[in-house]
Every structure is written in C-alpha cells, then in structure tokens.
C-alpha cells in the first residue's frame, strides 16, 4: 500500500472486551468495502486503554474473525495500550491551554451531587450523568496521579467562540456544534481516568485518528452523540476533522441493539456452525464479495 496521505483512509477500532458480533462484522466490512471502492486504505486499531476490561484472548479473536471475514489491514496495528505517551502529550497541551482540571469525585459523589434536589432534573450525556462541576475550581497544577482529568467545557468554549463544524455523509449541510449542546448535553467529560490515569476514549480516538491520517470515520450510530466532543477536541488540539459516517446498528429480532454479551451472535459461533463469510454479509445486508 502507498504511504503518505491518501484521499480515503478509514479504520475499524474495536475494544477487545468481548467477542466480535454481527454488529462489529457489519461495521468492519462496511468500512473495508468503502475503502476498497474509494481506492483508499483500511486500518485496524485496537482500543485497549481500559486494562481492567481488555483481554489478549479477545484481541487474538479479533484478528482471527476479521481475517476469516476476508478483510485485510495494514500492519503494524496500532494498539492504544502502547501509545500512552501520545495521549499524555495531548493532555499536557490541553493543560497548558487552561481547559483541564483534576477531579477527585467517585461515581457515588457524582450521582449524589447531580441528583441533589436543588439541581433540578439530572442531565445525561454520551458518558452518563452530566458532571455537576464539584471539582471545577481545582487548579490543573494541583493534580495528583490518582485524580481523573476533566475538560472544563466553559473554558474550552471561551477559547473557541467560533464553534467548529463537521461533515456527516448523507447530510448535506455541515453539522454545527452549539454552546447549548456542549454545556448541557455533554459537559465536563473525563479525558483521563481516575486511579489508572489511562486516557479516556474521547482523547485517544482523536489523537489516533489524526496520527493515522484517518479521513473518514465509519462507525455505529451509537457513537454519533460523541462526535461533537471529538470535533471540539480536534479544534482545541489543532488536528484535522475527518468526515463522519455513522451507520445504522444491527439489531436482534426484538429490535434491541447487539451488545458484546450477545455471544449467541458472535462471529466465531456462526463460523463454528458452518456459516461462510458471505452468509455473514447477507445477514447484515451487505452484497456478497
Ligand atoms: N472502540 C470503540 C468501540 O469498540 C469504537 C471507537 C470508534 O469507532 O470511534 O465501540
């Protein structure tokens, strides 16, 4: 494959926390098909920053399942657990810009503060309850290794009064971030986790998509609500914003979206039962290859 910045670079970025199911197969095959059609590149990235939940056996299974499905990806594969220096550098940069603060709250603290009667109805965002801001007064310089690190959304907005836009395939007008969406629908999200200090998904995904030259992010509609966070972080860090394509989710016969615990729909199981890769393509509505 050619090196350098291609016109179409996409990736499949699974977390090795369970077996790949039909939903993952659809996402990976769709991205692979779109890259092939565009004469572009397809990358695989292992999102394994959550050491408590990731397992080597699931990572091995990802390679096996994707190869069996007929997908080919470039090597070496970026594994996020080996890339923490890049995330730390991005955090340090945001820290210098004055948009981060250390947070000592436990989940229980957050639940109690967010649901206190004087707070009104608690607001929810892509990561759950919107953080009520208990630690917002803490200085970045006071952070301890065990603290979580949060983005101060108000300060971020002060730095970017002209809010960035992004392109979604299938939507003709550019998508625009709004102050209301960022303050009340997202809030002060975690960028590095408590105790382990590991980079949170929103930070690592933005750093890696830029470092890998990803031009098109193809992923499930469940992540569409996180995209404004990613676009804002790209703007703060001076990174390019890819084009986003959020595909529909594969659902079971009751309409519920598939989860990693749905082992009944694991690719490995279909394969063991004698299904072919084209059977899997048919099941998720993709043409035979
Ligand atoms: N690692 C994420 C997941 O498994 C996907 C991240 C992305 O595509 O941006 O859900």
Image (cartoon, grey):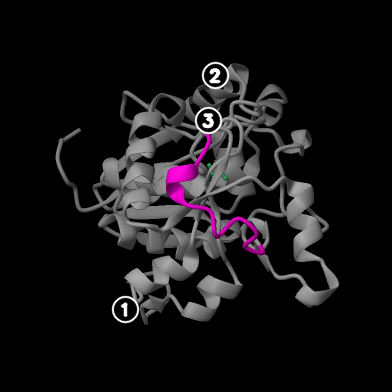
* CB contact under 8 Å: marks 3 and 1: no
Q: Is residue 28 above or below residue 286?
A: above
Determine whether label 1 and label 2 are within 8 Å by CB.
no
Question: Which-is-in-front pick, marks 2 and 3?
Answer: 3
Range of residues picked out in magenta? 132-144
Which circle's residue, 2 or 3, is located before the other in the chain?
A: 3
- Which residue is at the front of the view, 226 or 219? 226
- In this figure, which residue is indicated by the disc labeled 1? 162
For the N terminus, the image quarter is top left
- Between the residue at mark 1 and the residue at mark 2, the CA separation in whole angstroms equals 44 Å
Does the residue tagged 2 have its C-beta within 8 Å of any atom of ligand 1? Answer: no
Q: Which mark is residue 50?
A: none
Q: Residues within 10 Å of mark 2 (few under 14, many from 20)?
A: few
**Which image quadrant for residue 241?**
bottom left
The residue depicted at 51 percent of the width and 34 percent of the height is: 198
Name the side, left or right, on which 125 lies relative to 242. right
Give the residue pinned by disc 2: 60
Q: Tell me if residue 55 can be seen.
A: yes
- Give the percent coordinates (x, y) of residue 248: 58, 61
Would residue 192 be found to the left or right of residue 98 on screen? right
Q: State whether label 1 is within 8 Å of ligand 1.
A: no
Q: Nearer the viewer, mark 1 or mark 2?
A: 1
Label 2 element class: helix
Which one is in front in this view, the residue at disc 3 or the one at disc 1?
1
Q: Percent position (x, y) of residue 278?
A: 55, 39
Q: Earlier in the sequence, mark 3 or mark 1?
A: 3
Residue at 55% in and 56% down: 189
- Asked whether 135 falls inside the magenta stretch, the response is yes
Left or right of residue 212, residue 7 in this image: left
Instruction: Choose between 129 and 112: the one closer to the eye.
Output: 112
C-alpha separation, residue under disc 2 versus residue under disc 3: 13 Å
The C terminus lies in quadrant:
top left
């Amino acid at each position: 494959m050619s090196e350098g910045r291609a016109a179409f670079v996409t990736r499949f970025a699974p977390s090795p926390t369970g077996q790949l199911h039909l939903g993952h197969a659809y996402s990976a095959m769709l991205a692979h098909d779109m890259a092939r059609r565009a004469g572009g590149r397809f990358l695989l990235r292992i999102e394994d920053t959550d050491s408590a939940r990731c397992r080597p056996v699931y990572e091995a299974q990802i390679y096996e399942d994707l190869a069996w499905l007929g997908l080919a990806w470039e090597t070496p594969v970026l594994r996020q657990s080996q890339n923490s220096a890049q995330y730390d550098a991005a955090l340090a940069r945001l820290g210098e810009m004055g948009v981060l603060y250390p947070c000592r709250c436990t989940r229980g603290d957050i639940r109690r503060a967010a649901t206190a009667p004087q707070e009104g109805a608690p607001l929810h965002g892509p990561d759950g309850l919107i953080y009520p801001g208990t630690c917002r007064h803490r200085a970045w310089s006071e952070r301890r290794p065990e603290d979580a690190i949060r983005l101060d959304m108000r300060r971020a907005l002060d730095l970017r009064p002209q809010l960035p836009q992004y392109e979604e395939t299938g939507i003709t007008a550019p998508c625009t971030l709004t102050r209301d969406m960022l303050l009340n629908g997202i809030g002060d999200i975690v960028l590095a986790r408590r105790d382990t200090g590991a980079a949170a998904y929103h930070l690592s995904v933005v750093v890696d998509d830029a470092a890998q030259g990803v031009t098109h992010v193809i992923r499930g509609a469940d992540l569409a609500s996180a995209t404004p966070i990613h676009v804002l972080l790209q703007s703060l860090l001076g990174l390019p914003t890819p084009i986003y394509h959020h595909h529909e989710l594969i659902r079971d016969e009751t309409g519920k979206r598939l989860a990693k615990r749905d082992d009944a729909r694991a690719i490995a199981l279909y394969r063991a039962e004698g299904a072919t890769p084209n059977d899997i393509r048919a099941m998720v509505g993709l043409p035979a290859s």
